[in-house]
Image (cartoon, rainbow, N blue to C red):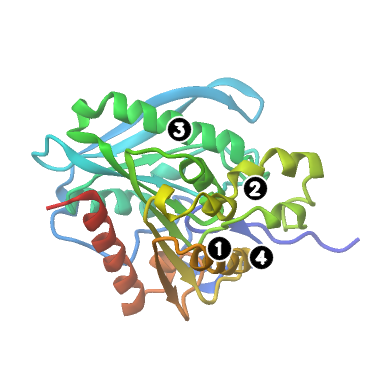
């Protein structure tokens, strides 16, 4: 019998056997380190931690709490918000990505830049339970909006950012109009569901019936709604991404977006690895993060 592929933890969220060397060196039990970017004031940001937004069945256990952390804008009463959505964890592990330094740094950078940062734990894992994770995201957004006054948040000015294997979760905010979602950010993501029918280092192809049940989560399919119905999108691609089938999905998404004249800010880090904001510590990574923040400020009306 051939040896099983080596399983390792990848930033932010996706797991694979072909772990980029730079990330393998940076990885620790605490999760991926902080991103390669800082802004003044981020270390002084106040955080409300472990806000329970729902309970759910996780790994066969009922009533497991799912929580989020909120990074507050100092002195703000109605600041816009950035919701950060991680990729897939190893099936069978508890959701915990909001504790990772990578997402903590994103939350602090958002708050120091005038946006309430929200980092949630959800149930996406290597079994591609997009439907469960999508439901978690919607419940988290509903909870944050309901308690907006506690966070100095404007509930009608949100952007949602998706990373890695979390890309298909973006389908829940692209497939129907949500006026309070003013923009979407996509970092090195899967952007359709073609990989669900392929063998990965963690599972075989999903059954056809299961893939059919998830069709509504494909971000590429959601583009058919047309530019007038979609929020502005910022998409960052890692040119040296080693995740199987991922960049193929990005390229299909870009081609479809251009065909439909969708509002798309697209950047490519030609030598960037998966998780380039963490592991490809060069000026191009910093420039892409800076472009992302300008995009957010523009579409969320940050003064």
Q: CA–CA distance between discs 1 and 4?
A: 13 Å
Local SS, label 3? helix
Front-most of residues 149 and 86: 149
Residue at numbered disc 2: 126
- Disc assigned to residue 177: none
Question: Pointer 2 and pointer 4: residues touching (CB < 8 Å)?
Answer: no
- Left or right relative to 32: residue 56: right
Q: CA–CA distance between discs 2 and 4?
A: 14 Å
Q: Position of residue 232 (x, y in %)?
A: 37, 55
Residue at numbered disc 1: 253
Local SS, label 2? loop
Question: Pointer 3 and pointer 4: residues touching (CB < 8 Å)?
Answer: no
From this view, report whether residue 253 is shown above or below residue 90.
Answer: below
Question: Pointer 2 and pointer 1: residues touching (CB < 8 Å)?
Answer: no
Determine crowd level at label 4: few under 14, some 14-19, many 20+ residues with C-alpha closer than 10 A: some
- Mark closest to the chain's N terminus, 2 or 4: 2
Residue at numbered disc 4: 245
Q: Position of residue 92 (x, y in %)?
A: 64, 38
């Amino acid at each position: 019998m051939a040896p099983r592929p080596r399983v390792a933890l990848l930033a932010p969220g996706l797991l694979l056997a072909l772990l980029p060397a730079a990330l393998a060196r940076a990885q620790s039990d605490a999760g991926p380190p902080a991103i390669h970017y800082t802004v003044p004031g981020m270390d002084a940001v106040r955080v409300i931690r472990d806000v329970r937004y729902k309970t759910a069945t996780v790994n066969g256990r009922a009533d497991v709490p799912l929580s989020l952390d909120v990074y507050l804008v100092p002195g703000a009463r109605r600041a816009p918000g950035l919701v950060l959505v991680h990729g897939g964890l190893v099936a069978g592990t508890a959701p915990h990505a909001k504790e990772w330094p990578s997402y903590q740094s994103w939350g602090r950078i958002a708050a120091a830049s005038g946006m309430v940062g929200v980092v949630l734990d959800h149930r996406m894992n290597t079994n591609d339970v997009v439907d469960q994770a999508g439901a978690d995201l919607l419940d988290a957004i509903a909870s944050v909006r309901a308690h907006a006054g506690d966070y100095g948040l404007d509930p009608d000015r949100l952007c949602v950012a998706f990373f890695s294997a979390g890309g298909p979760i973006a389908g829940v905010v692209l497939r129907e109009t949500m006026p309070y979602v003013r923009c979407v950010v996509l970092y090195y993501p899967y952007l359709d569901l073609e990989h669900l029918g392929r063998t990965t280092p963690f599972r075989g192809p999903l059954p056809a019936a299961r893939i059919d049940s998830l069709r509504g989560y494909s971000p590429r399919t959601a583009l058919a709604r047309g530019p007038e119905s979609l929020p502005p999108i910022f998409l960052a691609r890692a040119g040296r991404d080693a995740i199987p089938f991922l960049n193929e999905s990005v390229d299909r998404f870009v081609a479809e977006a251009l065909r439909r004249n969708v509002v798309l800010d697209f950047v490519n880090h030609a030598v960037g690895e998966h998780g380039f904001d963490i592991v490809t510590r060069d000026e191009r990574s910093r420039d892409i993060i800076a472009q992302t923040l300008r995009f957010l400020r523009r579409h969320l009306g940050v003064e």
